[in-house]
Structures are given as C-alpha cells and as structure tokens.
Amino acid sequence: MKLRQRIVLTLVGITVVLAIPAAYGLVGLRAVHDITDRLSQQRVATSTLGDLRNAAETALDGQRRYVAVFRVSSVLDDTTTAQDTSRVRIQVDSAIQSAVRALGVLRTQNGGEYARATVPAAETWSQIAENIRRERGLLAAREDAADTLRLALEDQFAVLEPRLDAIESTIVRRTGDELDEAERIAKNAASTTLLALALSLAATLLIGTLLTRTLLRPIALLRQGMGSVAEGDFEPHVRIPRERPDELGDLARSFGTMTEQLRELDRLKAEFVSVASHEIKTPLSVIRGYVTLLADGIYGDVNDQQKKTLEAVSAQTDRLTRLVHRLLDVSRFEAGGARLELRQIELRPFFDELTEDFRVLAVQNGIEFPVRLADDLPRTLVGDEDRLNEVLGNLLSNAFKFTAKGGTIRVDAARCDGGIQVEVEDTGVGIPPDKLPHVFEKFYQVDNEAQPRSVGSGLGLAIAREIVEAHGGTIGAESQVGRGTRFRVYLPERPPAAAGHA
Ligand code: ATP
Ligand code: MG
C-alpha cells in the first residue's frame, strides 16, 4: 500500500474511532432532552391544577354570595341589588367554565397520563355545576328545597378538594419519576461516554504509534545510512527494507543503487590513481637518472648556471616522486590492496633508528628533542616496521615543519592497554580547533602563514591513519594555536588476525 493511502486510511480510522464516544454522548443528550420536554409539560400540568383550584374556590364563594345577594334582592326589590345578583352570577359562570377548561387540559396533558386521576374530579365538578344551576332555579321559584340543595352543594365542594389533591400527588409522583430517570440517564451517558472516550484514545494512540513506527523506522535507518555515506563509508551496514511496496521502499532501493554506484566510482577512482601513479613512477626515475648523469658531467661540462638548474629539476623530480609514492599508498589502502609485512619489531632499536634521522635536524634548527622510552615499554611489537616508521616519521617531520627555532619536540613511548602508546608533541604553531578534525583527510592542509601550501602534499596523516588502523590501532591529535600540537598513536602488541591483508 502506498504511503499516502496508508496515511489517509489511518486518519479515517482515527476519525471513526473518535466519533464513537461523540455518538454515545449525543444519544445520552437526546434522552436527557426528551425528559426535559416531559418535565416542562409537568409544569404546565401543575399550573393548570392551580387554575382549577382557583376557579373552584371562586365558583364556591361566588355561589354563596349569589345566594345571599339574591335573598336580599327578593326582600328589597331594588335595581342595585338586582344588578349585583346578575354580576355575581356571571362571575360564577365564568369560574365554572374555567374549571371545565382546566379539567379538559389536565385530561389530555402528558399523553393522557393524568386522565385517570382527573375523571373523579371531573364527575364531581359536573355535579357541582349542575347543582349550581338547579339552586338558581329553586331560588327563583322560591322553593324550600333550595336550602337542602345548598347543604348538598357544600358537601360536594368538600368532596372535590381530596380529588384535586389526588391529581396533584399524581403530578408530583410523575415529576419525581422523571427526575430520577433523567439522573439515571445522565449518569449512564457520562460513564459510557467516558469509557468510550478512554477506549477511543487508547485505540487512536495505538493506530498513531503503529503508523509513526512504520514511517519513522525506515526513515531513521535511511538517515543512518546517508550519514555513513556522507562520512565516506559507501558500504553502510544498515538493513534498509527495500522490499516495502511504498515510497519508502522506492527510496531504499534508490539509496541502495546510489551506494553501489558510489562504491564502483570509488573503486574506479582508486584504480585510476593507482595505475596513473604507477605509470608516472618509471618515467620519473628515468628523468631523475638522466638529470643526475647531466649534473655529473657525463654528457659534457656544465656551467654553474646549468648545474643550479639541474639541481632544481632534480629536487622537483624528487618531490614529484614522493608525491606519486604517497598517492600510490593511499589508493592501495583505499582499494584494500595494501599488505602489511608483519614482523616482530624490537622497539628500542626501532625508536633509536627513527629519531636518529631527526637529531641532526633538531641541532640544525636549534630545537630541543628529548625522546623518552618508558621502562615498562614492551620489548617487541608485531607490525610492519617500514609502515610504522613512515607513520612516526611523518608525525616528526610535521612537528619539525611547524616548530620554530628554540622550540621543543618530545617523543614519549610507553606500555598502554595491551599495546603501546606513542606521543609526538611539539611547541609549534598549533592547529585551530575547527581545522583539527580535518587534518586526517586526504590533501587537507591548514591554511596559515606558518605553512606555505607547497610544502607537503597533505597526504601524510591520511596514510598514517590508514596504516595505524590497519594495525588495529588508533591515532588522534590535540592542539592549541600558538602553543603546540600533540599526536597520540595507540598500537596493540599484535594486530588483529586480518591485518596482514589490510
Ligand atoms: P605530507 O605529509 O603529505 O608531505 P603535509 O605534512 O602537509 O604533507 P599531513 O602530514 O597530512 O600533510 O598534515 C596535514 C596538515 O596538518 C598539515 O599540512 C598541517 O597544516 C597540519 N599539521 C600536521 N601536523 C602539524 C603540527 N605538528 N603542527 C601544526 N600543524 C600540523
Ligand atoms: Mg606531513
């Protein structure tokens, strides 16, 4: 699957997983919303019941007043009391109507939940309304039965009261139930949503981690590989998954092809340098030979001017020959074709011989040149004597090159960690910290006034490192500008088994 598809799929997965708790929350909210709706209907029912009570009371009081006023009007027979009678009657009628309306509302409220509790109250109320009408008729006919009916009406009002209470307690009970239900649903919704949220977060984290791992691991491997290539190792020992069918697989395959090509180019370059240097070596020695013959006057006399010129040609030819030899060395090490001639080296004679050559130079340049071979220095060491001589010779020649008259160059050799450590320290110009890490690179020379570029080729330390590492050892340097430089070489007493074929 391609990377883009994988990312899109993961994002969709995460969205779906996160939508689950949201859906749970919505369902809970919906249920709570329904209950709130029903609770607001309970409120309507409560206020309707209040209206009903008021209407009943108004009707009862009104009817009592009506009876009293009617009796007075029948004695007085004046227009004011007659008007009062009709006003009170209208009030009572209106209260009766209000009560009937309220009963109707209560019967249908909340999908008829209160219908059962309302029926007895409605029955009583219709009897009361009927009896009020009959009382008026009896009063108008001045019949004695009116008094009996009055008592019956008062009784009916007394019966109405508990029936209204019954409706009220039904409403209160229902409201309580609804509230309990709302609380239960809200609690359930909260805990389910929380659980779903926790599960979704865990799932999202898992999906995210899996995606990141599948993306980041190969990228980290590739970065490691690139780092190795950037440092000149064209055979990076990182297992990059080339078989992946996505873009990272493409990248890994391209990277593999690139390193193969770089290896091939590197091999061709080393081969070319090696062949070219080899081919140059012979004509150079022929030139050198003829120049010597010329200078020696074999082909006739040479004057002073010609002699000087021939000496210059000879010196430059020597320089070129040295350079060619070094190039040959470097390319051989790089192509893995250089062999070490391992032998037991007697260390004390080795150091004596090495430093002997430089003693004259030290005297000529007025440089102190102490050589200290520690008492615990092993007697022998297995290695390629000529190559090791080349390493330390280059360190010493560098030291002499960069140390002015009156300075000191020290050589210290001692036993160390199953081998020996040799230090070559000078009080010369030193190397700036930003240049120091590069001095072991091929053709690298520090650009400073103390050293004209023409002196040396910048290959000595590169070769020295190859040789030391081929012996299984290490080489390093520390330096302070203006105070001097110290090179430290560690060599094991016996190189690793493969070193003979380095
Ligand atoms: P070659 O050794 O090939 O004739 P080189 O001496 O210039 O030429 P390296 O021996 O590789 O090359 O040294 C690299 C550079 O490191 C030198 O050119 C010099 O700038 C710096 N360097 C090495 N040794 C010292 C030292 N003891 N003091 C100061 N600079 C040094
Ligand atoms: Mg050198």
Image (cartoon, rainbow, N blue to C red):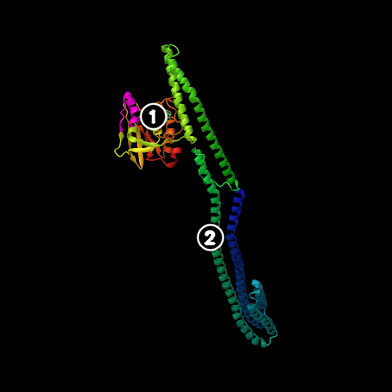
- At label 1, counting other C-alpha atoms closer than 10 Å, the crowd grade (few under 14, some 14-19, many 20 or more) is some
Q: Which of 461 and 483 is in front in this view?
A: 461
Is 357 a magenta residue?
Answer: yes
Q: Which of 205 and 137 is in front in this view?
A: 205
Quarter of the image containing the C terminus?
top left
Name the front one of labels 1 and 2. 1
394 to the left or right of 140: left
10 to the left or right of 345: right
Residue 439 lies, with reference to residue 315, above or below; the image says below
Observer able to see residue 502? no
Q: Does the residue labelled 1 lie within 8 Å of ligand 1?
A: yes
Tell me the magenta residue range: 351-371
In the rendered image, residue 42, in percent from the top left (x then y), is placed at: 60, 71
Q: Of helix, strand and loop, which mostly describes the magenta segment?
A: helix
In the rendered image, residue 412, in percent from the top left (x then y), is placed at: 32, 35
- Identified at 50% across, 30% down, the residue is 274
Residue 49 lies, with reference to residue 407, above or below; the image says below
In the rendered image, residue 414, in percent from the top left (x then y), is placed at: 32, 38
Q: Nearer the viewer, residue 386 or 420?
A: 386
Q: Residue 241 carries which label?
A: none
Kind of residue indicated by mark 1: Asn
The mark that comes first in sequence, 1 or 2, is: 2
Q: Residue 198 carries which label?
A: 2
Q: Name the residue under label 1.
A: 398
